[in-house]
Amino acid sequence: MPKYSAERKEAILRKVLPPLSRSVREVALEQDIHYQTIYAWMKEVREKGFTVPDKPTPPAQWSDAEKFSVVVETASFSEAELSQYCREKGLYVEQVHTWKAECMQGFKNSKTQQQEARKQAQADKKAIKQLKRELRQKEKALAETAALLVLPKKAQCALGRRRGALTPLSERKKLVGFIDEAYQQGARREMACLEVGISLRTYRRWTPAGRLQEDKRPTAIRPAPPNKLTEQEREQIIEVCNSPKYASLPPSQIVPALLDEGRYIASVSTYYRVLKQANQLHHRGRSRAPGKVNKPTTYTAENPNEVWSWDITYCASTVRGQYFYLYMIVDIYSRKIVGYEVHEQECGQKAAELLQRTCWREHTVKSLLVLHSDNGAPMKSVTMKAKMEELGVTPSYNRPRVSNDNPFSESTFRTLKYRPDWPSHGFKNLDEARSWVQTFVGWYNEEHKHSRIKFVTPSQRHQGLDGTILADRRKVLEAARTKRPQRWSGEIQNLDQVGAVTLNPEREVKEAA
């Protein structure tokens, strides 16, 4: 009987074992060995505890003993060794982990399994209870939404009611009926009141003790205020104002004149009120009557290159009466100077050329950009308007005779002219002016930490780096406060990122309580 070396045995077994898993008869014919000899070798290997499947079957179909053998064999392997072993055996690391978990589960006694089952049942019961609670809440919210959707259509007469306006009894009855109907359908009474345009407090005032009552203000008996003018005093005021001596004077001059004579009837505002009630308060003279001032158009920039502001300022020269003109475009979101030029005259053509170059450089052509300016001749020139229309830029202008509608450009010019190196005696020539402005723009955009954007540079905010910079500053302050907490009486400095910037924001009107 021939003898085979251990190296040859190992080489032949590698061919019939995973991952190659070749047929035993095929390998026997190839190596000129009887197939029974190879089966005997495989039996010896199996008896030593190594995983040797009887036939080339996939790992998912291995027996429990073979899987357990793999778990035991790989118990002490590191991650790298386990990965190598799995590749050699045609396995996945996840399969070995799964088999190991199954083995550990089998080691647990019945008491442990019962405890885990009890815990799982409690967790399932708690989850079911939470799901039922959420389902009830969603059903209530759905019923409320369905009830509120029809309220605005039913109560159109109440929408847009003025605060404190008298409400007829018929309208009150209709609104209260709508609210009660929505409440019965599942809506909260407070939300139903908001939909019809009243507050919950108003609803309760209309229905004290559950009964609807009418508005008692028209029939209320109010005592006369102690400072009310008598009819004689009213007639005296009108008589004084219509006297030849004071017929051409306004009340603001009549009252001081009477005081000089030692007489006092009423205040200036009372004179105006009495004259208005008597239909004697109208505009007189050649001056234009005061009219209502229109609100400026409001634009909000939430990102760079959405709203720009531009203007032209004088730069004095050393020659009296001669000026150089600085054209400057500022992004109101980042405060960055995105375009500038210095010329010897104001001209719409030069402004249009500057705008075109700036739009090309910032890639804002046809991007719904808004450009705000005052009402100067270059700003409203035909050339400038045509160029803005060509570039897809929306124009925005100051209100007539209002000088504070363009604050971003004005504040930038103030920073420019209050620099320590600003030549107070003027520039010698155009080249010197351009060189100085170029230096200023580089300092302003790259070095100047702007107070209105949390002291980051305009370029940093324009590039979107301000959030990261402010977060790093917050970490430094928090570390310093942790190290020396006694030096902080409250919170650290507010380092939240500045949000959207609004041009000419609307003023908030405080409502009466």
Image (tube, rainbow, N blue to C red):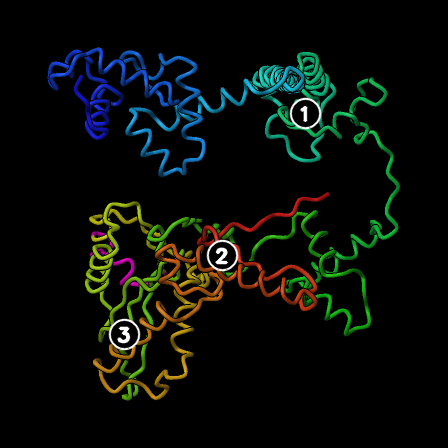
**Nearer to us in this view, 199 or 399:** 199
- Can residue 400 be seen in this snapshot? yes
Residue 438, which numbered label?
A: 3
Q: Residues within 10 Å of mark 1 (few under 14, many from 20)?
A: many
Tag 1 residue: 193
* x and y, in percent, of residue 7 in the image: 21, 30
- Quadrant into which the C terminus falls: top right
Residue 376 within the segment the image draws in magenta? yes
- Magenta range is 374-386
Gap between marks 1 and 2, in whole Å?
44 Å
- Quadrant into which the N terminus falls: top left
Which is in the foreground here, disc 2 or disc 3? 2
Give the mark nearer the N terminus: 3 vs 1.
1
Residue 471, which numbered label?
A: 2
Kindly identify the residue that appears in the image at 57 percent across and 63 percent down.
Answer: 477
Type of amino acid under label 1: Cys
- Can residue 144 be seen in this snapshot? no
Look at the numbered disc 1 and give the secondary structure of its residue: helix
When the figure is inspected, residue 45 is found, relative to residue 220, above or below; the finding is above
SS majority, magenta = loop
When the figure is inspected, residue 190 is found, relative to residue 230, above or below; the finding is above
Give the mark nearer the N terminus: 2 vs 3.
3
Which is in the foreground here, disc 1 or disc 2? 2
Give the mark nearer the N terminus: 1 vs 2.
1
* x and y, in percent, of residue 419 in the image: 40, 79
